């Protein structure tokens, strides 16, 4: 005997099945975005521009697919694994622009909500410390100072976003981390510069025949 609830349960079941299928797709796409974005960042630090570009292209394709899977299920844009994937992708794209000294892409240009964009920007600024240290190891003081200046500029901008954790989770903590990294990087650059001055002074103090 049919139940008076058969139609209603069938409607609920169809909606939940579609939601679960979308969730599974979004989980898979999010993992791909995070993996590819991480690979892109590693390639950038290694100077492998072709590898970074390929990883970023794959991450962007996965992100577009994930956003497409959210149509009809918009809550997944802000819950589950996708916000972390947005953050990782934003970090990689912003870091790419920072390292190339290019214009920083906006949230709308990346197709990323503003909340994970802000935390991704913070993480990208932190990655620039590695760029500064790599530059110092190569005696590229100009590159180190440029990286530090980008970190400081990002810190000042993000510090102006004074919103509670409920609005932008983890942003304040990340901004505090950037401040510490900027201070540490400034100290490293200063010490390296002083070391170079000392080396140059000692070299100039040697007799002409002892200089190499």
Image (tube, rainbow, N blue to C red):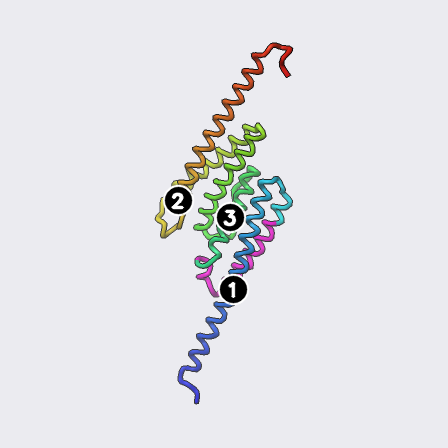
Predominant secondary structure in magenta?
helix
Dividing the picture into quadrants, the one containing residue 184 is top left
**Which label sits in the foreground, 1 or 3?**
1
Vertical placement of residue 34 versus 179, above or below = below
Earlier-in-chain disc, 2 versus 3: 3
Mark 3 neighbour class, 10 Å CA radius: few under 14, some 14 to 19, many 20 or more: many
Q: Which residue is mark 1?
A: 24
Q: Secondary structure at mark 1?
A: helix
Residue at 51%, 60% in the rendered image: 27
Residue at 62%, 42% in the rendered image: 49
Front-most of 174 and 99?
A: 174
Vertical placement of residue 4 versus 97, above or below = below
Q: Secondary structure at mark 2?
A: helix
Find residue 124 and report its horizontal and vertical position in percent: 50, 43
Q: Which residue is mark 3?
A: 90
Find residue 128 and report its horizontal and vertical position in percent: 51, 38
Query: How far apart are the alpha carbons under marks 2 and 3?
Result: 18 Å
């Amino acid at each position: 005997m049919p139940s008076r609830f058969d139609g209603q349960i069938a409607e609920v079941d169809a909606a939940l099945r579609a939601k679960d299928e979308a969730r599974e797709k979004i989980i898979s796409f999010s993992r791909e975005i995070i993996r590819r974005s991480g690979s892109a960042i590693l390639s950038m630090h290694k100077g492998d521009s072709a590898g970074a570009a390929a990883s970023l292209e794959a991450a962007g394709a996965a992100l577009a697919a994930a956003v497409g899977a959210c149509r009809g299920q918009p809550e997944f844009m802000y819950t589950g694994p996708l916000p972390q994937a947005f953050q990782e992708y934003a970090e990689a794209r912003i870091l790419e622009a920072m390292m190339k000294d290019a214009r920083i892409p906006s949230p709308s240009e990346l197709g990323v909500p503003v909340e994970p964009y802000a935390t991704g920007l913070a993480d990208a600024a932190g990655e620039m410390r590695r760029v500064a240290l790599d530059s110092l190891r190569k005696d590229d003081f100009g590159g180190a100072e440029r990286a530090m200046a980008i970190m400081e500029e990002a810190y000042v901008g993000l510090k102006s976003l004074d919103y509670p954790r409920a609005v932008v989770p983890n942003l304040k903590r990340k901004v505090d981390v950037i401040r510490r990294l900027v201070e540490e990087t400034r100290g490293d650059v200063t010490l390296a510069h002083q070391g170079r001055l000392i080396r140059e002074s000692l070299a100039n103090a040697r007799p002409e025949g002892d200089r190499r």
